[in-house]
Amino acid sequence: MTQFRPLPQDRPARIAVLDDYMGVAHRLAPWAQLAGKAEVEFLTEVLPQDLDAAAARLQGYDAICLLRERSAMPGELLRRLPGLKAIAATGRQNRTLDQAAADDLGIAVMTTTGSGNGVYATVELAWGLIIALMRHIPEECAGMREGAWQTRLGNALYGRSIGLVGLGKLGTRMAQIARAFGMEVLAWSPNLTSERAEAAGARYLPKAELLRTADVVSLHLVLGPTTRGILGAIDLAQMKPGAILINTARGPLVDTPALVDALRDGPLRGAGIDVYDHEPLAADAPIRRQANALITPHLGYSVQETFEAFYGETVENLESWLAGAPTRLAAQGEPRK
């Protein structure tokens, strides 16, 4: 059992809420409940990538609150923060936080358990990207502002096929919506079986066949050693000419330079991308200049309903930590998955 670093005794705890890019965290949870016990600061800037700069920015805080995986917390950084006593993470998983190092250092790591009514927000965004690409909505909107009228002919979803790479909770939800549109649902993942695909209302195909067949391919896998780069240059070249690729899962699932090539030279007609290898996305990233890439700044889970659930439980976790009995502790003795 980890012995956690002790709370400050002669002053309120200093808490930093990181990753508040939109400046909304302060109004989405009852932070006032911590008054008198803690001083809370909301940081809207991106934490520096340089370890020395990041450590300097976080010195003096007793606890930090993370929004999903926006700010990495490797062991090298945690070891440079001798005053850090608690981390209030959000979501059940955080692959950028070194749980083993936190345990060794006596830092209490607390998590949240739900997403509220935002549980399927990423799926909703995926469909928004699909429809926007199929019907050329961004281009037609821009044309309307310039005085144009009907410049591009779009395509219907009914009768087309969607290939789901990953058929977990979100992939299954994608399948339900696809069937409502009258689409054929195909699916593949490294461990998917025909029986499981059928139970979710999809037809299992080997990866190469799915890529050759589907009009839309949408990724819904977790990132791990076996899924990193699961769509590489060879895979993208196998996709159906004129197909659309959607990635609202994790950036490193796809070989990004190969994706840019496939958008520029074919076979892809377009791509809807919400996640990237490194976030925030660099201003000079080539995909920013690719006209047929509809790119969004990792908006998948970023809705008010999700943030209210995350930050509401974060306040509860901080209250329990300040009372000396932290709740919703992450599993100790092993890295978080």
Image (tube, rainbow, N blue to C red):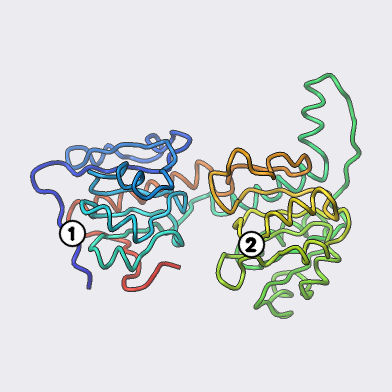
Which corner quadrant of the image does residue 186 belong to? Answer: bottom right
Q: As drawn, is 293 to the left or to the right of 10?
A: right
Q: Residues within 10 Å of mark 2 (few under 14, many from 20)?
A: many
- Work out which residue is located at the far top of the displayed protein and give it: 147
Residue 207 placement (x, y as % from top left): 76, 72
Kindly indicate whether the residue at mark 2 contacts the one at mark 1 (C-beta within 8 angstroms). no
> Which kind of residue does numbered mark 2 sit on?
Leu
Q: Residue at image x 82%, y 62%?
A: 237
Q: Quadrant of the N terminus?
A: bottom left
Q: Residue at image x 60%, y 73%?
A: 226
> Which kind of residue does numbered mark 1 sit on?
Arg
Name the one closer to the observer, 13 or 58: 58
Q: Of the residues under marks 1 and 2, which one precedes in the sequence?
A: 1
Name the one closer to the observer, 232 or 214: 232
Which corner quadrant of the image does residue 43 belong to? Answer: top left
Residue 292 placement (x, y as % from top left): 78, 43
Q: Disc 2 marks which residue?
A: 253
Q: Residues within 10 Å of mark 1 (few under 14, many from 20)?
A: some
Residue 158 placement (x, y as % from top left): 86, 53
Residue 321 placement (x, y as % from top left): 23, 54
Mark 2 residue element: helix
**Rendered image: mark on residue 5:** 1
Q: As drawn, is 182 to the left or to the right of 294?
A: right
Q: As drawn, is 121 to the left or to the right of 262?
A: left
Disc tally is: 2
Q: CA distance from mark 1 to mark 2?
A: 37 Å
Mark 1 residue element: loop
Q: Residue at image x 77%, y 56%?
A: 180
**Rendered image: mark on residue 296:** none
